[in-house]
Image: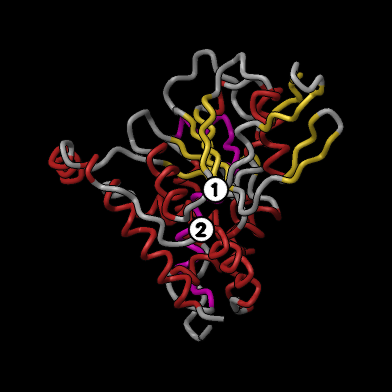
């Protein structure tokens, strides 16, 4: 196993992305961790913070097929997965595959889709296959869904139930750019079209990276650390429902992917901390009084990370 290979590919992807995207390095790394771990991502942010651009850039950098689905209340499951269409020339019904048949699928404003359509998407995410008129079809590998959500505009939306949210490996917050980043965006406004993202890796590289994950070493002390973090989310006084075993599994896998990205074949506590918020924030339900106290899920995770003792060095 060569962790340097993963670091080299990731650095190339980030360099390509920086041609088009200003800042957002941590968001891009979190998306790549999800891709390497075989999970899916929910991006939350207001319009205009480069969510779509990030998805397209990663797909192009890996030379993978990309599709975008704009969610609306009248979007049907068949609009996503496909359907059989009658061909008058041949007199037969022919399969027309939907936009879900891509390596990276951007599902814009998922909370605008009806619960039935959301369910069809989430089933495809989980099963990595779809059934059309009794025919089961495998989705391409690698397969990554990047769903977006606007945190402000809630009118006419269908919030995702907690059980559905749990299907997403990560929920990543995409913030506004800072002062200097906004200035850099303005400087590039007339030249951004001149830059082209060049493919620097392939879908096979992603599958190779995934095959390396089982060989990344996780010391027993790190496993204790992950377990204690998840257990502590359940004990927090402001939490109604804490992290499940799936949250612990997600922390474990994503910490391994972060180690590979940094060129290591072993996990350190900083890997766990880096992925803790995106993995836990949508899996924690706060008590009603938490909002009155000014608590957010991120603040709960901060409290937990401060409380749980960090393992001492010696995992190498």
For mark 2, give the secondary structure. Answer: helix
Residue 306 can be seen in this image? no
Residue 277 can be seen in this image? yes
Q: Which quadrant of the structure image shows residue 80?
A: top right
Q: Is residue 121 above or below residue 25?
A: above
Q: Which quadrant of the structure image shows residue 231?
A: bottom right
- At 86% from the left edge and 32% from the top edge, which residue is drawn? 134
Q: Tell whether 15 sits left or right of 32.
A: left
User: Looking at the picture, how far across and down is residue 20, in whole percent?
Assistant: 29, 46
Q: Which mark is residue 170?
A: 1
Task: Tell whether label 2 touches label 1 (CB within 8 Å).
Answer: yes
Residue 157 inside the magenta-drawn segment: no
Q: Is residue 270 above or below residue 111?
A: below
Q: Is residue 157 above or below residue 65?
A: above
- At 29% from the left edge and 38% from the top edge, which residue is drawn? 176
Which residue is the site of mark 2?
33
Residue 283 inside the magenta-drawn segment: yes
Packing grade of label 2 (10 A; few <14, some 14-19, many >=20) is many
Q: Which quadrant of the structure image shows residue 69?
A: top right
**Residue at the front extreme of this rendering:** 89
**Residue at the right extreme of this rendering:** 134
Q: Which region shows up in magenta?
A: 266-293
Q: Nearer the viewer, residue 255 or 34?
A: 34
Q: Is residue 211 above or below residue 160?
A: below
User: Looking at the picture, how far across and down is residue 169, in whole percent?
Assistant: 59, 49
């Amino acid at each position: 196993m060569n962790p340097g290979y993963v670091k080299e590919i990731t650095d190339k992807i980030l360099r390509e992305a920086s041609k088009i995207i200003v800042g957002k390095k941590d968001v891009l790394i979190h998306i790549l961790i999800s891709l390497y771990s075989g999970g899916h991502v929910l991006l939350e942010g207001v319009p205009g913070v480069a969510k779509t651009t990030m998805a397209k850039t990663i797909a192009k950098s890996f030379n993978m097929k990309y599709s975008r689905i704009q969610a609306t209340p009248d979007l049907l499951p068949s609009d996503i997965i496909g359907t059989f269409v009658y061909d008058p020339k041949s007199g037969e019904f022919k399969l027309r595959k939907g936009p879900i048949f891509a390596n990276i699928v951007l599902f814009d404003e998922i909370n605008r889709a009806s619960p039935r359509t959301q369910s069809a998407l989430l089933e495809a995410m989980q099963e990595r296959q779809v059934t059309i008129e009794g025919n089961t079809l495998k989705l391409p590998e690698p397969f990554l869904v990047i769903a977006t959500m606007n945190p402000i505009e809630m009118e006419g939306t269908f919030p995702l139930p907690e059980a559905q949210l749990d299907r997403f490996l990560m929920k990543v917050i995409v913030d506004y750019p800072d002062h200097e980043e906004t200035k850099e965006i303005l400087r590039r406004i007339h030249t951004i079209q001149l830059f082209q993202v060049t493919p620097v890796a392939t879908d096979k590289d992603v599958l190779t990276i995934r095959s390396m994950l089982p060989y990344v070493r996780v010391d027993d002390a790190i496993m204790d650390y992950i377990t204690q973090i998840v257990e502590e989310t359940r004990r927090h006084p402001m939490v109604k429902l804490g992290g499940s075993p799936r949250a612990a599994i997600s922390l474990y896998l994503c910490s391994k992917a972060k180690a590979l990205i940094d060129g290591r074949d072993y996990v350190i506590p900083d890997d766990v901390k880096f992925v803790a918020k995106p993995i836990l924030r949508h899996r924690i339900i706060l008590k009603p009084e938490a909002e009155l106290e000014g608590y957010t899920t991120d603040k709960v995770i901060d409290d937990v990370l401060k409380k749980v003792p960090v393992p001492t060095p010696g995992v190498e």
